[in-house]
Amino acid sequence: MKVSLIIPTLNAQAQLPALIDALRAQTATPQEILVVDSQSEDGTAQTARQLGCRVEVIARASFDHGGTRDMALRMTDGEAVVFMTQDAMPAHARSLEQLLAPLADPAVAAVGGRQIARPEARPYERLVRTFNYPEQSRTWTQADIPALGIRAYLISDVFAAYRRTAYLDAGGFDHPLPTNEDMLMAQRLLAAGYTLAYSGEAAVIHSHAFTWRQEYRRNRAIGRIMERYSGRFGCGEVGEGMTLVRRVTAQLLREGHGIECAAFALNCSARLLGNRAGRREERRARGKRQS
C-alpha cells in the first residue's frame, strides 16, 4: 500500500528536521511527504525541500483546516494518506506501521493514533491525554454511536490515516473550517457505512501548554463548529466532559496534586465558558442569516 504523508506547517523550521528524521526511521515509511507551508517566516519551506520533502506554499490567509487538507490530499496519490501536525513526534519506530495496520481490513476507512503528553506537560494535561487517548485499541461503526456518544467522532489529524477511496467516496473534509475537520470527517465516514479504528499502539508525543485565554479562544471556535453541525453529531458532549473532569480530578488527588486540581478547575472553566460563548455566537449568526 502506497502511503502519502501530509504535514501542514507554519514557522516549523526548528521542529521539522527531527520529525522528518523520525518518520524516515519508521518500520513503515511513507513513499511521499508533502509539506503544505503557510508562508513561514523562518525558512520552513526551504528546510523541508532540503530534507527531501515535496513542498506546496500557500498564502497564510488562505489556510483552512478542512480546505487545505482536502487540497493536499488531492495533490498526493497514496492509497493511504496520513496527516500529522508539526508539533507531533512518533513515540517509537513502529508508530506509523501500527497506524496503518487496521487499514488491512477493507471496511476500515480511517484510523486515529494515540497521543502521549510531553514529559514536561502539566499533570492534568497528561491525564486528559490519557483519558482521551487510551492504550486500548478499538474499532466501531455507526451502530456504536449511542454507546460511544461524542467519542464516536474522536479521530484527530494530529496523527491519522485515511483510506483514499473511502475519503473521496464520503465527500472529503468540510470546508471552510477553523477547527474540527477530523471529527466531521469521522461523522461522514460513519454515515457512509464505513468502520473507524483507533490504535493505541500507534503513538505520538503531543500535548499543549495553553494559557487559560488560549484555551478559552480555542474552545470558543470549537463551540461554534459543534453548534453549527449539531444536527450531524446527534449526541451531547456534556456527559463525556463531566466523566473526564471527575476522573482527572480523582487521579490528581490520588497523586497528591491538590494545587494542580485548582489549575485544572480553571482550565475546565475556560473550556466551558469558551464553548458556551462559541455556541451563543453561532446561534446569533444563524438567526441573522435566517432573518
Image (spheres, rainbow, N blue to C red):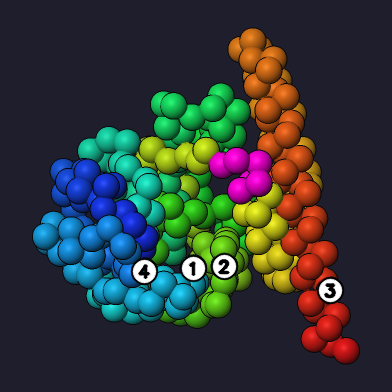
Observer-nearest residue: 165 or 3? Answer: 3
Q: Position of residue 227 (x, y in %)?
A: 75, 66
| Mark identifier at residue 284 | 3
Q: Depth-wise, is mark 2 or mark 4 nearer the camera?
A: 4
| Residue depicted at 62% across the width and 54% down the height | 218
In the rendered image, the vertical position of residue 205 relative to residue 153, given as above or below:
above
| Residue depicted at 32% across the width and 64% down the height | 40
| Mark identifier at residue 38 | 4
SS at circle 2: loop
Q: Main secondary structure of the magenta part?
A: helix
Q: Position of residue 288 (x, y in %)?
A: 83, 83
| Mark identifier at residue 265 | none
Q: Mark 4 or mark 3: which comes first in sequence? A: 4
Task: Name the side, left or right, on which 42 lies relative to 60.
Answer: left
Task: Name the side, left or right, on which 273 lies relative to 38.
Answer: right
- Reading the image, the residue beneath label 1 is 65
| Residue depicted at 56% across the width and 32% down the height | 125
Few, some or many C-alpha atoms within 10 Å of disc 2 (few <14, some 14-19, many ≥20)?
some
| Residue depicted at 61% across the width and 48% down the height | 214
Task: Name the side, left or right, on which 198 lies relative to 37.
Answer: right
Q: Mark 1 or mark 4: which comes first in sequence? A: 4
What is the span of residues highlighted in magenta in the rendered image? 210-215
Which quarter of the image is occupied by the C terminus?
bottom right
Q: Amino acid at mark 4?
A: Ser
Label 2 and label 4: CA atoms lie apart by 15 Å
Q: Mark 2 or mark 4: which comes first in sequence? A: 4
Q: Mark 2 or mark 1: which comes first in sequence? A: 1
In the rendered image, the vertical position of residue 105 relative to residue 225, given as above or below:
above
Q: Amino acid at mark 1?
A: His
Observer-nearest residue: 100 or 255? Answer: 255
